[in-house]
């Protein structure tokens, strides 16, 4: 059986719309919570057998068309010499934030095999366990999102320190972003070589920027990371992998800059739920594949509301090749598992009629 996700990335006609869900392996699942009771979050990420087990849970329970490796965007920063912990009630905390030219100069080169070997091993374990028709995703944070965490020292509401560096010290900003785009590229290549069929770049915080600032301070580095990923694959004589490992770029709250995202060079572009799928796809252009875009809060409602909104998205895609159904951001905690199950069944059985 063919891999529908990869077909959709290439904008080939599929027999039905493929589906996977961001954060599909997570706290809303009772089997995940049972594992979480035995391990801390970073333990789960860094123990390959546990990460593989959690990655496979939603595939076994719901049968999505792709698995995404259980990991987090921030641990690769440890390879640069950044001290990261996850604190209860606070989330990620960076204890030595990067805020000066000296801090940036002191960052070590990132080696994915030394720093992220646990994720690469988990990918190989999952790849061996997945059916051939189920795709396997690797992923990375995008340079801007990684930079914002590194500079702010954790999450932020206004990205004040990040924007201050952009505006007041652009030399340091671009130096940091260059190091992070290099990290993203080598990390993605290592994941592909470990078994990932495709990769997604998460730019969770880039929606905090104006289109002008995104174009000036972020887009060149995002494009560089994607271009370098393909170049490194080719140099490593992985031309076949380069062809069959599409790159998806996804950010939230970026609907005011969709034409700019086209310039990243990604094979597939995501859409969050703040725009109708057909409107967003028209802005991207129908010669590129799209992913999205159900509001994850919809899955907390009753089934009739979920079905109506899912049908609306599928009808807006209009059977056009190149659509991957997904939520417009990650599944939320306390989402009823039965709603996820019914959504997967509905999308996978839906036939668009013009």
Image (cartoon, helix red, strand yellow):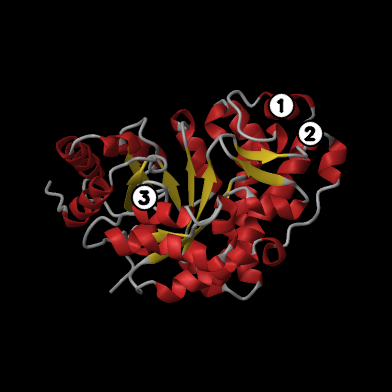
Find disc 3 in the rendering and name its residue. 21
Would residue 39 be seen by someone viewing this image from the given angle? yes
Q: Is residue 315 above or below residue 131?
A: above
| 314 left or right, relative to 139 | left
For label 1, the crowd category at 10 Å Cα-Cα, with few meaning under 14, some 14 to 19 and many 20 or more, is some
Residue lying furthest right in this view? 102
Residue 111 percent coordinates (x, y)? 72, 62
Find disc 2 in the rendering and name its residue. 99
Tell me the distance, in whole angstroms, between the alpha carbons under discs 2 and 3.
35 Å
Residue lying furthest left in this view? 353
Instruction: Look at 64% across and 53% down and name the residue there.
Output: 184
Instruction: Look at 35% across and 40% down and name the residue there.
Output: 334
Residue 170 is drawn in which quadrant? Answer: top right
Q: Is residue 252 above or below residue 8?
A: above
Element under disc 2: loop
Determine whether label 1 and label 2 are within 8 Å by CB. yes
Among numbered discs 1 and 2, the one appearing first in the sequence: 2
Disc sitting over residue 161 in the figure: 1
Instruction: Look at 37% across and 47% down and name the residue there.
Output: 291
Nearest to the observer: residue 2 or residue 224: 2
Element under disc 3: loop
Image quarter of the N terminus: bottom left
Residue 307 is drawn in which quadrant? Answer: top left
For label 3, the crowd category at 10 Å Cα-Cα, with few meaning under 14, some 14 to 19 and many 20 or more, is many
Nearest to the observer: residue 39 or residue 289: 39
Tell me the distance, in whole angstroms, between the alpha carbons under discs 1 and 3.
32 Å
Residue 335 percent coordinates (x, y)? 32, 41
Among numbered discs 1 and 3, the one appearing first in the sequence: 3
């Amino acid at each position: 059986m063919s891999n529908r996700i990869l077909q959709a990335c290439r904008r080939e006609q599929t027999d039905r719309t493929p589906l996977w869900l961001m954060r599909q392996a997570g706290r809303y699942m009772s089997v995940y919570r049972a594992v979480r009771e035995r391990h801390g979050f970073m333990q789960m990420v860094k123990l390959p057998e546990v990460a593989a087990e959690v990655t496979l849970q939603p595939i076994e329970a719901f049968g999505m068309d792709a698995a995404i490796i259980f990991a987090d965007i921030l641990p690769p920063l440890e390879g640069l010499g950044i001290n990261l912990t996850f604190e209860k009630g606070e989330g990620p905390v960076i204890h030595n934030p990067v805020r000066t030219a000296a801090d940036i100069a002191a960052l070590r080169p990132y080696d994915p095999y030394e720093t992220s070997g646990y994720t690469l091993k988990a990918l190989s374990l999952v790849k061996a366990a997945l059916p051939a028709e189920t795709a396997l995703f690797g992923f990375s944070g995008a340079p801007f999102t990684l930079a914002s965490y590194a500079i702010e020292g954790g999450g932020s509401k206004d990205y004040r320190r990040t924007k201050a560096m952009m505006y007041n010290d652009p030399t340091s900003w671009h130096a940091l972003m260059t190091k992070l785009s290099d990290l993203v590229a080598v990390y993605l290549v290592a994941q592909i070589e470990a078994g990932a069929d495709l990769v997604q770049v998460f730019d969770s915080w880039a929606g905090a920027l104006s289109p002008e600032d995104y174009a000036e301070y972020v887009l060149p580095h995002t494009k560089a990371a994607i271009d370098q990923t393909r170049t490194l694959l080719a140099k490593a004589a992985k031309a076949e992998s380069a062809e069959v490992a599409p790159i998806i770029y996804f950010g939230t709250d970026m609907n005011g800059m969709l034409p700019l995202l086209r310039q990243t060079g990604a094979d597939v572009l995501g859409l969050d739920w703040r725009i109708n799928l057909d409107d967003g796809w028209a802005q991207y252009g129908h010669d590129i594949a799209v992913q999205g875009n159900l509001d994850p809060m919809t899955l907390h409602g009753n089934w009739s509301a979920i079905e109506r909104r899912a049908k609306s998205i599928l009808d807006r895609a209009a059977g056009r090749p190149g659509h991957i159904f997904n939520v417009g951001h990650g599944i939320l905690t306390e989402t009823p598992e039965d709603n996820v199950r019914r959504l997967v069944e509905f999308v996978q059985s839906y036939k668009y009629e013009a």
